Image (cartoon, rainbow, N blue to C red):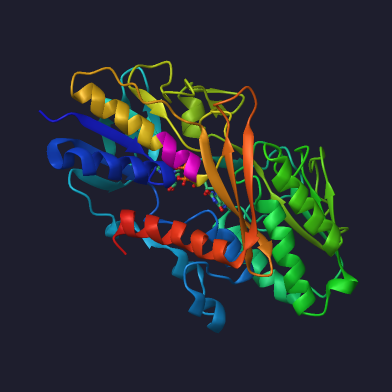
């Protein structure tokens, strides 16, 4: 009988894990990849939706044809030997038995990997409503995209409710792109832009990146309020609020008893939970590294290497590097890159690559290579 790998969540982590395993052993494994959605959207595409950009197709920027549909990558195009994509919703996880219940049935696993991403919790922040005044869900990005053209100037707050949150530079990117938009529409003089952020700087592990962002904010009159978080939104008082809601592991993972303080407890180097052959990776895992796509991807490669070693009868020696990179929109069409390494030294280390037009091409290549690798497009 083939070994059964059940992967929960076909996001950044799940897609990369299924792809790596399939490439290595093809249909010698029985891989089930479960997702409740019928499509994947890159996280950064939410900014593209919000501002009507579409990072992968310049013509779309030019002609303004971008829609939510244009950033959707359908799972029907994810075709890999040995992988079955199940369009199901996970309703219960029994990590001791490595058994998963979905709205369509039960899946038993020899190796169970939980990669369900992070969910949002607005219960502790009165005034913030999912799909309304936040840009972290597709619904919210879409809604605000409709609100932006009607904005006639005034005070704008880009506010983070809690850390850690996905893609730490995203609020800064949002502010810089918004500045450009308001300048273009002749509304900047009538507007203020403030970022409220619980972190000590826009990118704490890379002082150089933080310095460059703070300089850009200063040049553009954007105020960065560090060490502050949004605890309540007074929708009547705030002209435009673009929120980042509190994140945490999905309820189904919390109910499985796998979390502490909202995140899944794992060995940060092997991604294994306290249950043997049950792994958690990506945004929901408490790795101490940023919640960003590339970090989910390297974690997925680590789990794949150790599962493959175990299948060969060897002891897995792969270790999650806790290192990766993020592209940062700096406004004016320029993109910067920051590489951060969380595990090699006593403290995280970051390397900053200043914004250029060339790095935009790199960011686009980041998207297109994944799109081609996972979806064959
Ligand atoms: C506005 C914004 C901008 C971002 N920008 C960047 C960026 O520029 N660069 C970058 O690297 N990262 C960026 N990110 C972060 C990036 O999107 C995430 O870190 C990454 O997607 C995490 O991967 P993951 O596999 O953990 O989870 P996800 O990619 O979120 O995938 C989780 C999957 O699980 C599925 N799922 C959830 N619950 C269930 C259930 N009960 N049953 C079945 N399926 C379920 C979901 O449908 C989803 O497909 C951004 C995020 C946001 C919100």
Q: For this rendering, which residue is in front, 36 or 377?
A: 377
The residue drawn where x is 40% and y is 52% is 37
The residue drawn where x is 60% and y is 72% is 52
Q: For this rendering, which residue is in front, 329 or 208?
A: 208
Q: Position of residue 284 (x, y in %)?
A: 51, 34
**Is residue 309 left or right of 201 when viewed as pictured?**
left
| Residue found at the far left of this picture | 1
- The quadrant the C terminus occupies is bottom left
- Residue 362, relative to residue 265: is it above or below? below
* Residue 116 seen in render: no
- Residue 234, relative to residue 50: is it above or below? above
- Residue 346, relative to residue 140: is it above or below? above
Q: Which quarter of the picture shows residue 349?
A: top right
- The quadrant the N terminus occupies is top left
Q: Where is residue 139 in the image (x, y as percent from the top left)?
A: 57, 60
State the extent of the magenta-drawn residues as a range. 294-299
Q: Where is residue 312 in the image (x, y as percent from the top left)?
A: 18, 23
């Amino acid at each position: 009988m083939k070994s059964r790998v059940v992967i929960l969540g076909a996001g950044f982590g799940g897609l990369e894990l299924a792809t790596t395993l399939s490439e290595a052993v093809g249909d010698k494994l029985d891989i089930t990849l479960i997702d409740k959605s019928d499509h994947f959207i890159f996280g950064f595409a939410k900014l593209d939706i919000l501002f009507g950009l579409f990072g992968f197709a310049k013509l779309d920027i030019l002609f303004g044809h971008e829609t939510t549909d244009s950033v959707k990558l359908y799972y029907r195009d994810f075709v890999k030997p040995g992988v079955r994509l199940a369009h199901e919703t996970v309703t219960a996880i029994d990590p001791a038995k490595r058994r998963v219940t979905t709205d369509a049935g039960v899946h038993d696993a020899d190796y169970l990997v939980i990669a369900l991403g992070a969910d949002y919790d607005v219960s502790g922040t009165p005034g913030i409503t999912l799909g309304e005044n936040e840009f972290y869900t597709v619904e919210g990005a879409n809604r605000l995209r409709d609100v932006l053209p009607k904005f006639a100037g005034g005070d704008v707050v880009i506010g983070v409710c809690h850390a850690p949150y996905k893609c730490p530079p995203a609020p800064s990117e949002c502010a810089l792109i918004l500045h450009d938009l308001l300048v273009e529409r002749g509304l900047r003089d009538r507007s203020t832009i403030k970022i409220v952020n619980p972190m000590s700087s826009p990118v704490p592990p890379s002082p150089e990146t933080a310095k460059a962002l703070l300089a850009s904010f200063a040049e553009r009159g954007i105020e960065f309020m560090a060490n502050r978080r949004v605890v309540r939104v007074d929708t009547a008082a705030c002209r435009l609020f673009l929120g980042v809601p509190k994140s945490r592991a999905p309820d189904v993972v919390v109910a499985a008893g796998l979390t502490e303080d909202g995140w899944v407890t794992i060995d940060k180097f092997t991604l294994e939970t306290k249950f043997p052959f049950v792994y958690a990776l990506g945004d929901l895992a408490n790795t101490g590294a940023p919640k960003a796509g590339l970090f989910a991807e390297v974690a997925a490669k680590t789990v794949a290497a150790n599962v493959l070693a175990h299948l060969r009868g060897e002891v897995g020696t792969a270790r999650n590097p806790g290192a990766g990179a993020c592209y940062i929109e700096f406004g004016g069409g320029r993109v910067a890159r920051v590489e951060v390494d969380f595990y090699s030294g006593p403290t995280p280390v970051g390397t900053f690559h200043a914004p250029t037009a060339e790095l935009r091409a790199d960011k686009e290549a980041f998207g297109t290579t994944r799109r081609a690798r996972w979806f064959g497009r």
